[in-house]
Amino acid sequence: MTLFRTLVLSLIGILVSLAGAVALATIAAALYFAPGLPDVRQLEDFDLHTPLRIYTRDGQLMGEYGEERRIPVDFQDIPEPLINALVAAEDQHYFEHPGVDPRGLVRAAVELARSGGTIQSGGSTITMQVARNYLLTLDQTFTRKFREILLALQMEQVLNKQEILSLYVNKIFLGHRAYGIAAASRTYYDRPMDELTLAESAMIAGLPKAPSAFNPLSNPERSLIRRNWILFRMRELGFIAPDVYQEAVQAPITAQRHVAQAEVEAAYVAEMARQYAIEQFGDKAYTSGYHIYTTIDSELQPLARRTLAQGLLAYDRRHGFRGPEQNDIPASLVEAQEKTATEGLEEELSESPEIRQTAREAAERSQTEVAGIEGDVSNWVQVLQRTPSYGLLEPAIVVESGEREMRVLTDEENVYTLNWEGMKWTGKGSAEQIAKRGDLIRVIIDDEEDTLRLSQRPEAEGALVAQQPRTGAIVALQGGFDFDASKFNRAIQARRQSGSIFKPFIYLPALNDGEMNAASVVNDAPIVIDDGSDSLWRPVNSSRDFNGPMRLRPALARSRNLVTIRILQSMGLGYTINFLERFGFNPDHLPRGLSLALGSASLTPLEMTNAYAILANGGFKVSPWYIKRIERGEEDSATEVYKADPTAACRDCAEGQETVEIDGDSYRIAQRIADKEAVYILRDMLRDVIEHGTGRAALTLERDDIVGKTGSTNALRDAWFAGFNGNIATAVWVGKDSNQTIAEYGSQAALPIWKDFMGGALEGTPEAWPEQPETVVSMRVDPDTGLRMRDDESGGISELFDEEHLPSYQPRRVSRELERVSGSEGSGTAESIF
């Protein structure tokens, strides 16, 4: 007995010593970490974040960024079923423990030992999650976990359970940009929290663990398993009665995405503004209530988005159908659930075999019937709801296809019959060859006629930029077919060869310097240059022919490459590049060779638009800008933290005048960088591109004040059109991100988009052709030589000149009879006779 007693006492002593050692170690660690811990009292006055908002120039919302889908709630506003669901899912002993649950920590310690130093999951109470979300980083290390424990213990001394839970439900991310349970209730069910069913409350409670993996929209099959596990836990903990449990686990999925739409779809510009805000204000941009007002026009921006999308879709139809986006999609949720993976659901599925069974039963009860379709199509409906629309393209799933028609289901649970007229462009022999049952395709719906046609996401991309010439303000910008399809902003990020739309900027230095004029004759003949490579450079015209000597005006209208190269040779590469720098072209992006004349410079659509805007305003250096002002705070008490200070063109301003007022705003007067005479004459020459050259399709706009230039690059990789009138300058680019050929010229791919946009933008507006400068005069010239004709001579053509740079007179010519009589046959000049 004495030996046994001794052993017991020894064991007790060892345990006490170990406990004491652990306690001392804990105290020592606490003393070590305590000085670096944040003050939990700051949570008492924690200010929830206010998002960054982006607006058009007239105050319409274009975008919202940050932890913004948040509706703060107090504890008393949270329905009891939702509280119980959260507790059952995240921390069943929440209202009992002092901030830390020892049983959970034991599980975490075991995991820590097994993983070799990192904690994957488990052990965190709701209080610890609040400490982590509000006060700590999210790295999964032992140090952070210990700090989390200490903060949780402190927090429970400062705040009560209700206050801590309120902080938790307002902060947690629940998928689809919803932060907090109130925002999630609106996002998924479009109802306030107190109107949620028990099953819906459990669905939301299942999201904090993995907002994407257990999302009812993105992963409905997995979310059912997670939801029913939480309901199972609620029954086991006594939160709900067995009959209530049975009803809830059988409930179908009712979640749908409910998102407040922007008033103006301008995602590419909104993203530009977001990046600017981050550069200026850091992460506070998302949380401190900044409002950015841009120069974007709320009518022109939708027009730009629509016309670019329509033009790209038209291009794509000309180049054939590539097939459905997805194949063989199961119609019902039951079929889909049988195929779904269960990785990450081991904890839920191991709790009880009834979890999988009830999830299957719920899937069966989630069946959806749509008029006109036989059977359950619940999975098709879910797939369509989570498949984004791209521009004008809506997703649709084929119900059945026959010889000459196809029935499809759309996102709004409407069944349409797609007639052969809407899909014959594919070149297929029948609807069955295009797509079959269960295939996901894209359609364009005509709401007015209640019809639709087959389409597809285009392979080619594009960009459109429109500016006010006088101020440089960007009024519309679309950086691609659709932002959701590709966030790459081609308007400002895609450097592509500019092709022939660059040629006017080779002509302008010659006109500006007076070396040449619109009637100067340049030989359109072969050029062979040894550029130092293994082979000689032999540039050609796109038509592969030569016209011989020709004047600059028709050469520009017909986009003759060899004439442009000879102009650059005449003016000199260095001089021309220095001149081009005035237009905002970065000299580092301009090639040091004669290929510059052919548009080999890689430039963005925004750079080209701004250069044409300078031509449109008469030669004043304006720069592109899109942010008018930035305010911070609520509208009734906002503080202006930034205001733009751009320059503006002013043709009629007095010498020495420094500012000019336009539409109520004051601008600094822009510097003139090209002579008004040269710019006016070049503009008149560009009108010939519309009337007689490659831009003739623009004549259908029936306006005399528009000018422009087409552009195409080697192997037809890029198609351009840039042009303007006095009020708006616009450039359009079409190409492939892969830099493969699009097999169309600028007049085919880009000009129709430009024409549709400009037609809408200028509709109902008066023509805006600038007044001809007094120093620009009209003279008759010989069309063959470009030399001036005398008043007493008949014939010739009219041309514009700067009065300081008039061409020489054409030598007088005599008749052949006078030549014969005078003995001066063949000379053709009066001087040879006398």
Image: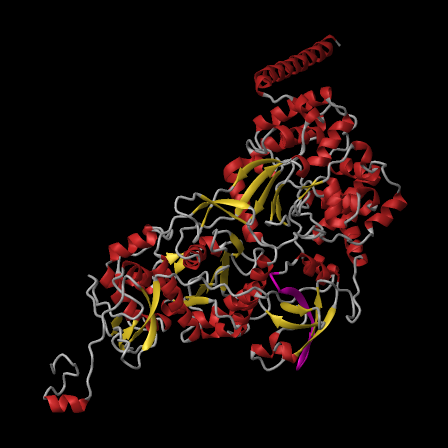
Q: Which residues lie in the magenta part?
A: 390-406
| Count of numbered badges drawn on the protein | 0
- Residue 405 in magenta stretch: yes
- Examine the image and state in which quarter residue 162 appears: top right
Q: Picture coordinates of residue 712 (x, y %)?
A: 40, 68
Residue 391 falls inside the magenta stretch: yes
Left or right? Give the position of 166 relative to 545. Answer: right
> Looking at the picture, how far across and down is residue 451, in whole percent?
69, 73
- Residue 557 in percent (x, y) is at 37, 72
Q: Farthest residue in the front direction?
A: 792
Color style of the picture: secondary structure
Front residue of this view, candidates 221 and 154: 154
Q: Position of residue 223 (x, y in %)?
A: 72, 49
State the residue in front, 625 or 389. 625
- Residue drawn 74% across the image and 70% down it: 415
Quarter of the image containing the N terminus? Answer: top right
Residue that appears at 40% across and 64% down: 683
